Image (cartoon, grey):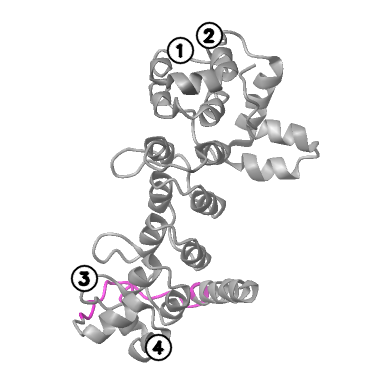
Amino acid sequence: REWLEWEDRRRAAAQQCQSQRCPPSSRAQLTRPRRSCRDPAVHSALFSGDLQQIQALFQDEDTANMIVETHTAPLTIAAARGYTDCARYLIQQGAELDARVGGRAALHEACARAQSDCVRLLLTFGAKRHTPLHNACANGCGGLAELLLHHGACAAVPNGAGHTPMDCALQAVQDAPNWEPEILFAALLDYGAQPVRPEMLRHCANFPRALEVLLNAYPCVPSCDTWVETVLPELWQEHEAFYSSALSMVNQPRRLQHLARLAIRAQLGSRCRQAAARLPLPPLLRDYLLLRVEGCIQ
């Protein structure tokens, strides 16, 4: 696997160098008509991930970019189903990374279906990253979101509906059980997301660790009126220390240590996570800078 990832990076770099040396002419940049194919054998090979059949059927750039029976691009099908070897072959044959045949590009589909290996492959070859981040957040895929952020996705850009990745993550908290939303929230904040609007805190009121991360992004704890009534009684009893500390700190001055943390984070901006790793700090202090969960608001 390490060799394959190295080879993918080498090929991606070679393609980039080639495109810089020989930029396409204005004529070549025009959108060419795509071939359509309704052959069931093509459809079957793509949906089953039959690499040998795909190698036999897609042997040049035209075939790699044709529209298949489901009105979708071959690369989008392979990426959505997690067929990494098939996706790699199609890319090497010239499949367009960001083609939106049928609605969404290959990276969007791979993120929506949590196909992390295909996401990594597409990112290596330079697929565009912004809207896929919204998909990853909306599906509660923290690992994919961090991968996209690490490759340059913007944590603050809104999608077509005006929602930021943080908005999508907040709305996914209730819909994606058995995950750790605090990890995704911290990553988004580390990569430049703004603190959430106080009225949005109700979405994670029953996730105390996630709520703590979001409250620590403010210089002062905002009013709890929007979320306190939604906390389940049994959860309040289990995490009473945290919830009581949050209530007691509403509109109260925070510690100088916390304000210093926010000042440093503001200075680092969207580079906070990478910069923190390079700062000569003890591990505990570095974790504190990156909004480590402590179990109470101080």
Whether 34 is among the magenta residues is yes
**What is the spatial separation of the Cα atoms under label 1 and label 4, in whole angstroms?**
60 Å
Tag 1 and tag 4, C-beta contact below 8 Å: no
* Amino acid type, label 4: Gln
SS at mark 4 in the image: helix
SS at mark 1 in the image: loop
**What is the spatial separation of the Cα atoms under label 2 and label 3, in whole angstroms?**
55 Å
Q: Where does label 4 land, which residue? A: 55
Q: Where does label 1 land, which residue? A: 223
Of labels 4 and 2, earlier in sequence is: 4
256 w.r.t. 289: above or below:
above
Q: Could you say where residue 187 lies in the image, as x and y percent from the top left? A: 56, 41
Crowd rating for badge 3 (residues with CA inside 10 Å; few <14, some 14–19, many 20+)? some
Whether 154 is among the magenta residues is no
Q: Where does label 2 land, which residue? A: 251
Picture quarter with the N terminus: bottom right
Tag 1 and tag 2, C-beta contact below 8 Å: yes
Q: Where does label 3 land, which residue? A: 71
Tag 1 and tag 3, C-beta contact below 8 Å: no
Crowd rating for badge 4 (residues with CA inside 10 Å; few <14, some 14–19, many 20+)? some
Picture quarter with the C terminus: top right
User: Would residue 98 appear left or right of 155 to someone viewing this image?
Assistant: left
